Image: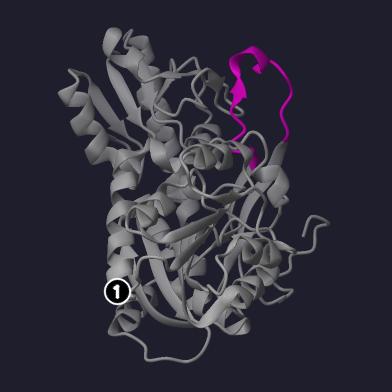
Amino acid sequence: MNDGEMVCQACGFEDLEKVLDLGFQPLCNEFRPATQASGPQIFYPLSLCHCPKCALVQLDYIIPTGIAFGEQYTYLTGTSRSLVEYFSKLAGELVDRFGLQPGDVVLEIGSNDGTFLAAFKSLGMVVLGVEGAEQPAAIAKERGVPTIGRFFGTGSVNAVREQLPPGKGVRLVLGMNVLAHTDNISEFLPLVVELMEEDSVFVSQSHWLTALIRKFEFDTVYHEHLRYYTLESLTNLFKQHGLNILDAEIKDFYGGSVLVYASKGPGATSPGLDKVKEQEKKIDVAQSLKDMKLVLLENKAQMLNLLVDLKKQGKRVIGVGAPMKASTLLNFYGITPDLVEYLAEVNELKIGTVVPGVRIPVISEDEVFLDPPDYAILLSWNMADAIIAKYRESGYKGKFILPVPRVEVI
C-alpha cells in the first residue's frame, strides 16, 4: 500500500473507496523528550478507506509494526485505574464462562504491561504474554508476568510452545485491542489458529467502528490502528482463516468496543451476535464516514473559537490526559501551546515529553492541583466521568471542555 496501490488488507480487493481524509499526521505515540522538541518529525498520510467486498475499513498507508510500536511506544494499561478494574473483572468472568481450572494456560498477544494477565495469574492460571514494545514488556516482567519480548509473527508459535508447561496446551488466547495493530493480519490469524487446541477460545476486543461513527470519535483514527472493525468485517476476516465467531458483546471501554469469542471449528452461536448485527445494519458505514468530515470541520471551528476567546480573556487552559488520540485531535484541529498550556498525565513514561506535531508539553497531573487552571480539555474523553470525579475530589474547581462528540463546556 505504501507505493500508492490501495489493496484491502484482509481480502486483497483492489478497488477501495476513500471515505475520510485527516491529512498528514505524525505517529501519535511519538512523544519526544522536551529536550528534543525542536527536532524534525515525520508526518504520514492518515486516510480511511472502505472495502465494498469484505466491509473492512482501513488506513490506506501502512507503517510497519516495528516502527509504529518501537522505542517511542509508551502506552501502559496499568496507569488507568478503570482499565485495571475492567480487566480484573473480565478475567474472572472468562474463567467462570469457560470453566478454566488452576494451572490452565492463558496466552495474551500484545500483552502490554501484563495488567490483564496479572489478573489471571492471581486466579491460579499459568500465564504467558507476547509483547514487542520494549518498555511495556519490561514492566510486565518486573511484575512477574512471563513475557516473550517480540512482536507476534513468524517464529512466535515455537517461541510460545517452548515456554508452555510440558503436556499443556493453550486454553485461552487473548488479543485485546491488538487486531487493529499488526501490519500483517493475514499472517497473524493463522498463527493464532496454530496455537489453539480444539477446546481453545480466542477472545479479542477491538474498537467498534459503529461507535466511532455514532459518537464522531475521529481521534481514535491514527497510524497505530491500521483497521477499524465491525462485527461484520471481523466475521468475514475470521472465516478466511478458519475461525468461527460464537458470540459477541459491546463494551463501553475505549469509546465502544466489540468483544468477540471465536473457536477453531463450528459451534453454536449466541443471540448476542444477532443483537450486534442488528445495530450495525442501521448505519451505512461508507457514507457515514464521508459525512463525518463536515461535522469535524464545524467542531474544529467551535473549539478554536472557544480557545481563542478564552485566551483573549486571560484564562488558562490545559489538557487532561495524553492518550494517543490526543495527538490526532490536537494536530487535526491545529491546537498549539499558544492555546493549551500543557497536558496533565499520570503515565511516568510520557511526563517530560511533548505531544507529537503540536509539541504541547506533558507534565505530571500533580501540578494541576498546585496551580489550578481555569479550563481543562478532557482529551481522555472516554473516561470523562471518572476523571471529573477524581479532579473534583482533589479540589479542582475550574470548568471542563469535552471535545468529542461535540464541543461542550461542563
The total number of labels drawn is 1
Magenta highlight on residue 272: no
Magenta highlight on residue 34: yes
Report if residue 43 is visible in the image. yes
The spot of residue 358 in percent (x, y) is 57, 25
**Position of 385 compared to 334: left or right?**
left
Name the kind of residue labelled 1 in the image: Arg
Q: How is the image coloured?
A: one colour
Closer-to-camera residue (195/40): 195
Residue at image mark 1: 97
- Find numbered disc 1 in the image and state the secondary structure of the residue it sits on: helix
Using the rendered view, name the quadrant where residue 307 is placed.
top left
Q: Quadrant of the C terminus?
A: top left
Residue drawn 32% across and 58% down?
Answer: 123
* Looking at the image, residue 86 lies above or below residue 384: below
The spot of residue 314 in percent (x, y) is 33, 7
In the rendered image, the residue lying farthest to the right is 3
**Position of 198 compared to 189: left or right?**
left
Residues in magenta, as a range: 24-42
Using the rendered view, name the quadrant where residue 357 is placed.
top right
**Position of 139 compared to 186: left or right?**
left
Circle 1 crowding by C-alpha within 10 Å: few under 14, some 14–19, many from 20: few
* Looking at the image, residue 103 lies above or below residue 30: below
Report if residue 406 is visible in the image. no
The spot of residue 158 in percent (x, y) is 70, 66
In the rendered image, the residue lying farthest to the front is 166
Using the rendered view, name the quadrant where residue 343 is placed.
top left
